[in-house]
Image (cartoon, rainbow, N blue to C red):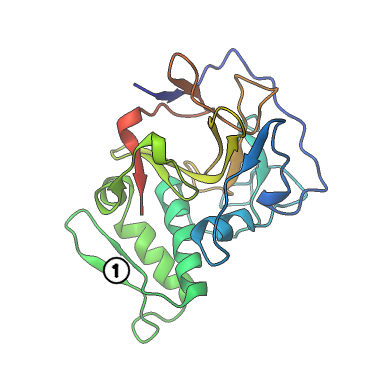
């Protein structure tokens, strides 16, 4: 089983380069190259997400998060002033922003499979729609909405998710592949509880690889704040 978990004893972090502007500016380790994506794809959209110059993670109320060791960088995306945009919500936010940009249908389902569809006539504005989704949908419903994905076909935009109360979800923001072995490495982003800035995660177990992650020989991947298993990889 592929487990993703935290070991608090290892807190060596990778310095953040303040000149990074987007996800695709993050350097790929030697012997790896980014997988190809089409111009209009979700993968391309995620790679172009802008990063803040300040890597501090702030909560929805403007206070700094207590744990500042988990993040490598912070995405330049609003959090809102309510404790709503948490883990699954951050994943849905990124997907919704992409579909909105593409002018494609947007909907998310709750635990009872009721759909919440973006309709400008129904909602006063975009933020009101998002807050409705955040309130009614979560890790359980999002896990149901997504499809199972094989690690052999890992792609940008895939989601690692554990539905539950509590549950958690992270999204794969980029993927690179070893030019000889084909081994894949990837970047992960999350929000957390309480609602906070969406941030790119550090690899606290392998500072020489961070912020990239890969599956170890023991099929364990350590991330800062949760444990996942190999049957929890999903795709849209």
Furthest residue toward left? 112
- Residue 47: horizontal and vertical position, in percent? 61, 54
Quadrant (top left, top right, bottom left, bottom right) of the N terminus: top left
- Placement of 116 over or under 53, stated as above or below: below
Between 19 and 224, the residue placed more toward the observer is 19
- Residue 203: horizontal and vertical position, in percent? 60, 27
In the rendered structure, the answer to whether residue 233 lies left or right of residue 224 reads left
Q: Is residue 65 visible?
A: no
Estimate how packed mark 1 is, as few (under 14), some (14 to 19) or many (20 or more) residues with alpha carbons within 10 Å: some
In the rendered structure, the answer to whether residue 160 lies left or right of residue 197 reads left
Quadrant (top left, top right, bottom left, bottom right) of the C terminus: bottom left
Between 216 and 111, the residue placed more toward the observer is 216
- Residue 68: horizontal and vertical position, in percent? 65, 33
Residue 80 in which image quadrant: bottom right
In the rendered structure, the answer to whether residue 64 lies left or right of residue 185 reads right
- Residue 172: horizontal and vertical position, in percent? 50, 44
Furthest residue toward right? 19
Residue that badge 1 annotates: 116
Q: Residue at 53% of width from left, 32% of height from top?
A: 182
Between 9 and 98, the residue placed more toward the observer is 98
In the rendered structure, the answer to whether residue 21 lies left or right of residue 176 reads right
What secondary structure is found at the residue carrying circle 1? Answer: strand
Q: Residue at 35% of width from left, 29% of height from top?
A: 230
């Amino acid at each position: 089983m592929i487990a993703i978990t935290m070991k608090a004893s290892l807190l060596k972090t990778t310095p953040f380069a303040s000149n990074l502007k987007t996800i695709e500016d993050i350097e790929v380790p030697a012997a790896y190259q980014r997988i190809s994506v089409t111009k209009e794809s979700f993968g391309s959209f995620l790679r172009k997400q802008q990063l803040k110059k300040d890597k501090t993670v702030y909560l929805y109320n403007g206070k700094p998060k207590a744990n500042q060791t988990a993040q490598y960088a912070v995405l330049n995306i609003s959090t809102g002033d309510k404790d709503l945009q948490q883990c699954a919500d951050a994943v849905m936010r990124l997907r919704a922003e992409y579909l909105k940009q593409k002018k494609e249908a947007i909907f998310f389902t709750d635990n009872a499979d009721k759909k919440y569809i973006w309709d400008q006539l129904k909602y006063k504005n975009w933020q009101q729609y998002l807050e409705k989704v955040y309130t009614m949908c979560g890790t359980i419903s999002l896990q149901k909405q997504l499809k199972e994905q094989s690690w052999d076909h890992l792609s940008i935009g895939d989601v690692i998710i554990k539905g539950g109360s509590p549950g958690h979800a992270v999204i794969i923001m980029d993927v690179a592949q070893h030019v000889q072995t084909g081994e894949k490495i990837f970047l992960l982003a999350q929000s957390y509880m309480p609602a906070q800035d969406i941030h790119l995660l550090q690899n606290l177990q392998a500072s020489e690889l961070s912020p990239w992650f890969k599956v170890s020989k023991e099929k364990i991947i350590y991330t800062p704040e949760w444990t996942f298993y190999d049957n929890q990889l999903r795709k849209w």
